[in-house]
Amino acid sequence: MRFTRTTAAVAATGLTAFTLVACGDNKPEQPSLTDASSTSASAESTDTTGATTTTEAPAELATVAAAQSALQTAAGAVPGGQPFDLEVEVTDGQVQFEAKVASDGDEHKLVIDAAGEKVISQTKSDKPDDDVAKLAGTTVTAAQALDTASGKQPEAQFKELEIDTNDADVVVWEVELVDAAGAETEYTIDAHTGEVLTP
């Protein structure tokens, strides 16, 4: 009887060991932590690479000197041309000026290079902008209005300029400049007297 119990005990011990080994062999691997770490590292690497290779688009700003050149170029591109709108745009990563010029009641749209010296494209609008009529009787040109505004902020960059009518029904030039800190200031200049009305 004692031998039988011993044999049974040994058999039980062997079975237990086999069970443990079997469980150990069948224990699923735990790749989740490693895989997650690898995935995370890969994602971080991708993000880092993306951040390194991505370049910011140029700001829609230009020097006042380039803007003045663009106004002169626009005026000279159309007989009797009077620029009444000028904006800085970025197309395909390239800074350009978009100008609107009035001539004999017609409106011409021009795209000018970043230096303000070369006309890239030019089209005549089928229907002139309402702003064309606002030029009638004005004595202050767009270039003069820009000079006046930039005189208030010599270090600022140019963003846009247009002719408009204020709340008092006065025809004005609106000139927007941006300083080194990114703050924008819009100057409103009387198109008849040249007086700075705001700010």
Image (tube, rainbow, N blue to C red):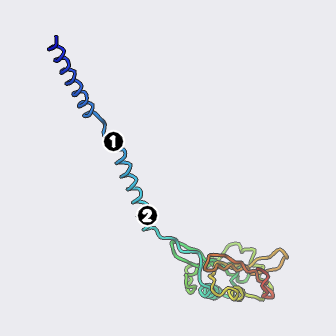
**Residue drawn at (71%, 85%), measured in percent from left and top?**
149
Quarter of the figure with the C terminus = bottom right
173, 35: nearer the viewer: 35
The local crowd at label 2, few if under 14, some if 14 to 19, many if 20 or more residues have their Cα within 10 Å, is few
Residue 50, position in %: x, y? 43, 63
Which of label 2 and label 1 is nearer to you?
Answer: 1
Quarter of the figure with the N terminus = top left
- In the displayed structure, would residue 42 be above or below residue 57? above
**Residue drawn at (73%, 80%), measured in percent from left and top?**
187
On residue 30, the disc is: 1
Amino acid type shown at disc 1: Gln
Q: Is residue 175 left or right of residue 54?
A: right
For the residues labelled 2 and 1, the Cα–Cα distance comes to 31 Å
54, 70: nearer the viewer: 54
Whether the residues at callouts 2 and 1 have beta carbons within 8 Å, the answer is no
Amino acid type shown at disc 2: Gly
Residue 94, position in %: x, y? 52, 76
Residue positioned most to the top: 1
SS at badge 1: loop
SS at badge 2: helix
Residue positioned most to the right: 168
Residue 166, position in %: x, y? 80, 76
**What is the quadrant of residue 109 in the picture?**
bottom right
Residue 87, position in %: x, y? 64, 77
Q: How many marks?
A: 2
Write down the residue under mark 2. Answer: 50
Which badge, 2 or 1, comes first in the chain's sequence?
1
